[in-house]
Amino acid sequence: MGIPPYRDFIEPVLRFLVDNSACVHVQELNEAAANSLSLTKEDRNACLKSGKKVYKNRTAWALNTLNHARI
């Protein structure tokens, strides 16, 4: 299947934030999104040229999109 685009990370990120509104650690958010999207070990190990994990980058983009969308 591969790693979905960042927009597919928005719903799992939002659900995690709703359920964990008191305190959110980025690593927990990354793992919750990856688990929700059923990412494989290979998916989780895929890196960008910068060395950053692709799924963590997409989680960050989803979070950034939600942050910009808030009223």
Image: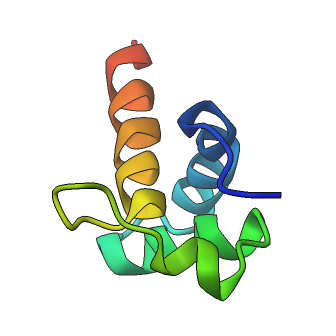
Q: Write the residue at 76% across / 62% down.
A: 37
Q: Is 61 on the left-hand or right-hand side of 13?
A: left
Q: Give the x, y percent position of residue 41.
A: 63, 87
Judge by depth and name the residue closer to the eye, 28 or 8: 8
Q: Is residue 25 above or below residue 2?
A: below
Q: Give the x, y percent position of residue 9.
A: 61, 46
Q: Give the x, y percent position of residue 49.
A: 23, 55
Coloring applied to the structure: rainbow
> Which picture quadrant has residue 3?
bottom right
Q: Write the residue at 79% across / 72% down.
A: 38
Query: Looking at the image, which residue sits at the far bottom?
Result: 41
Which image quarter holds the C terminus?
top left
Which image quarter holds the N terminus?
bottom right
Judge by depth and name the residue closer to the eye, 6 or 1: 1
> Which picture quadrant has residue 10?
top right
Q: Is 35 on the left-hand or right-hand side of 20?
A: right
Q: Write the residue at 69% across / 39% down.
A: 8
Judge by depth and name the residue closer to the eye, 71 or 47: 47
Query: Looking at the image, which residue sits at the far left?
Result: 50
Q: Write the residue at 41% across / 26% down.
A: 65
Q: Is residue 41 above or below residue 70?
A: below
> Which picture quadrant has residue 34?
bottom right
Q: Is residue 64 above or below residue 2?
A: above
Q: Is residue 25 above or below residue 49?
A: below
